[in-house]
Amino acid sequence: MLTKYYKVSALLVLGLITGHAASAQTDTLKISTQEAEKLFLTNNLQLIAQKYNVDAAQALVKQAKLWDNPTLSTDQNITDANKKFFNHSNGTGQIMVQLSQVFKIAGKRGKEVQVAQDGVQIQQAQFNDLMRNLRYNLLLDLSQIANLVDQRKVYEVEIASATNMVKAIDKSYQNGNNSLKDLVRLKALLFGLQNDLVEIDRQINDLQSELKTLLVTDQSKFLSPQITFSVRDTVINTTDLIAQAKANRGDYLANRYLLDQSNHNLALQKAMAVPDITIGSTYDQNSSYARNYVGLEISLPLPLLNRNQGNIKNARLAAQSQEYILKNSEIQLNNDVYTAVQQYKLSQQMLGRQETDFYDKYDQIYRGMAKAYQIKQISLQEFIDFFDSYRETKLKILQQQLNLQKAIADLNLAVGATVITPL
């Protein structure tokens, strides 16, 4: 009964695996890191949406440069003594026309333009920060998918070997040369490997969804990242990278531009306390001391009660708050770069050539151990122990490669620029 259960379970798992593999083979789109980045920059909808915010901020700069519209007003009699409507014949009736224009003083218009220009810089920095973070997600997705595909190959090799081993032991068991315990133990090992492979496929499927959303590609295609792994000796200087990060990182620059905007807004609010002057002209037909009167109008509010005190204090406190936010952002930037550099160096050390050569020898030993068990030179437990050790070793080297790829992505993210070209 137990043997029948393992056979049915194995068939179900293999069916899932085969179905996925067939789909991947017929609908696979091979894509390099460079090709993925080009698609990302062209297609990503979040970037397109944020770009509109930059354009919208630029429109506000144009608006800030515009002058206020002049004001035209008129006052006419509706009826006269004879009850005639709008009768202005023969010099009768009354018409008054006023035309006025507000002139902003104390440099208000220039200060408003500067605040709007700061807004453009903030939106552009936020666009760059969004692109920085999305590109990071893109590189991680590519690296993780490629790593899982390599893990899948390890499991496929072990599953093929375990399947052949189960067939051989099953045949030997039928002839009375092996125990049922050994057969069940091997089938349990095979079943565990097949379940692990299904879990890998599930992770790949989730990452494929994220990657296709970032690149806006056909959901029916399997995206196969083409990543060639290599260990590089790259000399990096933390101090130089921190300076580079301050010039490139969108989140830091956005906070710096917000501080500039806060200071410029404080200057604007102080200027708003200075009254604007309204200059105009008035034509009056009959109500003035002389007919057809034309006069000059100059007016300005007296800053006795409202001198914009509240807005000035608000702007000053906002600027002081933003100073501390910028300082905190700078500290975070320094720590991000330092940590990313250290992590990259550690990942490099873990993948030295000597260790890589050692792992490669496992393939030769693995084949020898499988043959040794079949001819009874080693026990089943010894074979399974090495079987597990082989898989763990191969997966560890793949994990270390992924760690290095992530360290490269983390370093580029921390600096806000491509310090090391992704693998």
Image (tube, rainbow, N blue to C red):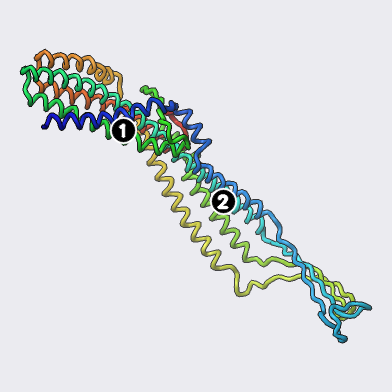
Separation (CA) of disc 1 from disc 2:
46 Å
Q: Is residue 242 visible?
A: no
Instruction: Give left or right: position of 115 versus 292.
Output: left
Residue 123: x %, y % from top left = 54, 47
Number of other residues with Cα within 10 Å of mark 2, as a class: few under 14, some 14 to 19, many 20 or more? many
Residue depicted at 51% across the width and 63% down the height: 314
Q: Is residue 137 left or right of residue 61?
A: left
- Which amino acid does the dot numbered 1 rest on? Asp
The secondary element bearing badge 1 is classed as helix
User: From this viewpoint, which residue is outermost toward the bottom?
Assistant: 81
User: Camera-side residue: 338 or 217?
Assistant: 217
Residue at figure coordinates x 44%, y 28% from the top left = 33
Q: Which mark is residue 201?
A: 1
Q: Amino acid at mark 2?
A: Gly
Quarter of the image for residue 379 reads: top left
Q: Do labels 1 and 2 touch, CB within 8 Å?
A: no
User: In this figure, which residue is indicated by the disc labeled 2?
Assistant: 119
> Where, by quadrant of the figure, is residue 175 drawn?
top left
